[in-house]
Image (tube, rainbow, N blue to C red):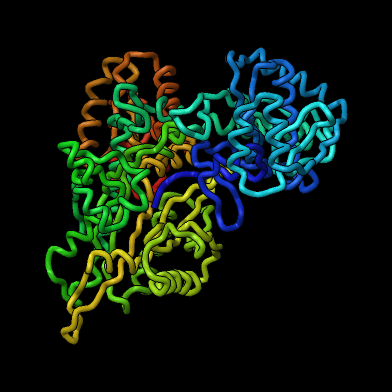
């Protein structure tokens, strides 16, 4: 399953050629747009709630008003696309000069003038020939290219009064009088490639936001500030968890010692849960012959998302003989299963791996840890008999829910990700798909789990049950997933010896409670705002010696803690106590222990926690004992 977050675009202009995916329900998605901030509603009364359908029209019209303002102020600027998006709008321009912050202020001022003129929005239908004639008369090459991609007629045009027009599918408000200039703000300028293609012209994208009232805009800005405060890219750097380096390349995070500890804690937690449930650990290579992925179907259906094939000669390359970096782990686990003939007595066989996979994401699609080019999946593949399928599927769901509970992730929905029968992107027979989808439907009905269907969201080889998590900022991310697969066992000719001695085909279950470990950590950083619970914190306690005289005692205490698995640091900076406390707080370390002369004499530590504040002096032995007992729910307190 491809990881990523898709931003739904519901109003559009000049974007027929930029569609990466059209879902069955008619929504249009642009995977190369990064997620933006969530719908603003939690702190508003019902009377203040924005009308989503009206907001879409307002924002779409605001994008047209902005484009009109830009072309009035910058006559050489050519327009391309200008959709409404969640929480705002944007327009892409080809302009010889870069837009500045000063330009944005001037554009907003011109927009206010246009709005105050109360111009009507007029829809016009014209023939293809007439549309071409008008576009050629104003010398807009991008519009001509878009016109060529429109397959339906008549061609629709929206006018702002009689002064500006654009090819557009709507919808819009009836007049600019319905826009409130005080509820509109231009936010930023970013680069964008024409049609999302790095080989084509680089454009300038102006982002804006529009609301029904200034109060809604103010609430949006407040939540946007909160999003910036929680931004995992910012916190990851401040807390020293991971870095990106230009010589390494975009989308390839480097994990620091503290970040590696965090990763290891999460991996060890899940590994222990898996061992309790009969999973068997495996390790597989990072590359394989391209033939492996031809059998699985990845090469035919997924090659555009894979890194290029490595071939020794030009002839090998032409004949597709070479190696590729793996985009998935499942073909490797299949080879382990297939390495010997299995008996029904060995099933279910649950193979598990924290396997790193590689996806050739476009640079515009990358975003911190949530969209990277190399990431680790808590991957497992279960080989089961048809009779074991339902019970094993339910067991996997129980594991995923256990993981969510331990990570304090409570706000999620279950999505039945089924195939779109009208699409040709899937492999396998209708019968196999019907059986797989039926198994998932039975599972959620057995559990009484609230769910919704996502038609067209299935993997190319099978349907899935996806868990869609809503974070502290109301953004939605896919985390855990479990898939039923009748297709790959058939393509790889998998068998087992049944009880009656005949050869039968197993069913596969693909599952990943975390999904991408990188994305999970990015989400957890933002969910906790970097303030991890005690069991997950890279550093659990920092000892703060008041003077150099207490340093030997602090080191002695640390030496007692480390062999017991307690993650401890000693502040040897020599700073004043107040500065050491502030530094520990900035690093969001759960516990601080002040070590002064009294503490040394009493063999105690003066404990201060982020959760409970000052706890006073507690004996070293008691602190160690409580920290030894730590679990995902442990919080130290004074008895």
Q: Nearer the viewer, residue 349 or 198?
A: 198
Residue 25 x, y percent position in the rendering = 60, 57
Which corner quadrant of the image does residue 496 belong to?
bottom left
Q: Residue at (38%, 70%) from the top-left corner?
A: 429
Residue 535 in sight here:
no
Q: Quick one: quadrant of the C terminus?
A: top left
121 to the left or right of 363: right
230 to the left or right of 271: right
Residue 604 x, y percent position in the rendering = 31, 32
Q: Residue at (20%, 44%) from the top-left corner?
A: 323
217 vs 20: above or below = above
133 to the left or right of 567: right
Q: Residue at (50%, 53%) from the top-left corner?
A: 468
Q: Nearer the viewer, residue 30 or 214?
A: 30
Residue 562 x, y percent position in the rendering = 22, 36
Residue 246 in sight here:
yes
Residue 353 x, y percent position in the rendering = 25, 52
593 vs 7: above or below = above
């Amino acid at each position: 399953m491809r990881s990523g977050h898709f931003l739904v675009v519901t109003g559009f202009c000049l974007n027929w050629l930029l569609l990466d995916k059209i879902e069955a329900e008619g929504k249009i998605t642009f995977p190369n747009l990064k997620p933006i901030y969530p719908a603003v509603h939690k702190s508003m009364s019902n009377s203040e709630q924005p009308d989503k359908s009206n907001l879409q029209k307002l924002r779409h019209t605001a994008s047209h008003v902005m484009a009109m303002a830009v072309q009035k102020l910058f006559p050489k600027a050519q327009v391309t696309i200008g959709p409404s998006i969640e929480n705002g709008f944007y327009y892409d321009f080809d302009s010889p000069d870069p837009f500045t912050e000063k330009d944005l202020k001037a554009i907003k001022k011109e927009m206010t003038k246009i709005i105050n003129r109360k111009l009507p929005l007029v829809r016009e239908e014209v023939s293809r020939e007439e549309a071409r004639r008008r576009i050629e008369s104003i010398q807009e090459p991008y519009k001509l290219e878009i016109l060529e991609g429109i397959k339906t007629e008549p061609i629709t045009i929206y006018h702002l009064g009689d002064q500006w027009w654009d090819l557009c599918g709507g919808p819009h408000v009836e007049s600019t009088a319905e826009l409130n200039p005080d509820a509109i703000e231009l936010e930023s300028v970013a680069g964008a490639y024409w049609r999302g293609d790095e080989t084509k012209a680089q454009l300038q994208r102006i982002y804006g936001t529009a609301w029904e009232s200034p109060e809604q805009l103010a609430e949006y800005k407040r939540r946007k500030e909160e999003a910036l405060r929680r931004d995992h890219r910012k916190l990851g750097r401040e807390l020293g968890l991971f870095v990106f380096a230009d010589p390494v390349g975009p989308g390839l995070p480097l994990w620091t010692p503290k970040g590696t500890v965090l990763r290891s804690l999460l991996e060890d937690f899940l590994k222990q849960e898996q061992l309790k449930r009969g999973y068997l650990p495996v390790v597989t290579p990072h590359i394989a012959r391209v033939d492996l992925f031809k059998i699985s179907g990845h090469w035919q259906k997924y090659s555009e998302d894979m890194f290029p094939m490595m071939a020794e000669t030009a002839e090998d390359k032409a004949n597709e003989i070479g190696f590729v970096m793996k985009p998935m782990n499942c073909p490797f686990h299949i080879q382990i299963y297939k390495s010997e003939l299995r008996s029904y007595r060995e099933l279910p066989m649950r193979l598990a791996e924290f396997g790193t996979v590689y996806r050739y994401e476009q640079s515009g699609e990358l975003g911190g840890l949530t969209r990277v080019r190399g990431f680790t999946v808590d991957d497992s593949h279960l080989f089961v008999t048809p009779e074991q399928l339902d019970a094993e599927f339910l067991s996997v769901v129980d594991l995923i829910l256990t993981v969510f509970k331990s990570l304090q992730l409570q706000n999620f929905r279950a999505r039945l990700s089924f195939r779109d029968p009208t699409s040709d992107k899937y492999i396998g027979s209708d019968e196999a798909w019907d059986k797989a989808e039926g198994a998932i439907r039975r599972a959620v009905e057995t559990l009484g789990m609230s769910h919704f269907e996502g038609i067209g969201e299935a993997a190319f080889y099978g349907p899935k049950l996806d868990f869609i998590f809503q974070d502290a900022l109301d953004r939605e991310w896919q985390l855990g997933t479990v898939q039923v697969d009748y297709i790959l066992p058939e393509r790889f000719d998998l068998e087992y010896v049944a009880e009656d001695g005949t050869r039968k085909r197993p069913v596969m279950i693909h599952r990943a409670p975390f999904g991408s470990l990188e994305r999970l950590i990015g989400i957890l950083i933002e969910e906790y705002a970097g303030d991890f619970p005690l069991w997950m914190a890279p550093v659990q306690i920092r000892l703060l010696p008041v003077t150099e005289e207490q340093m030997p005692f602090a080191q002695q205490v640390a030496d007692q803690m480390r062999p017991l698995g307690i993650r401890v640091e000693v502040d040897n900076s020599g700073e004043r106590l107040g500065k050491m406390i502030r530094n520990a707080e900035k690093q969001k370390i759960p516990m601080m222990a002040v070590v002064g002369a009294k503490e040394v004499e009493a063999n105690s530590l003066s404990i201060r926690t982020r959760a409970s504040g000052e706890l006073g002096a507690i004996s070293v032995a008691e602190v160690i004992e409580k920290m030894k007992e730590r679990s995902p729910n442990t919080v130290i307190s004074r008895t």
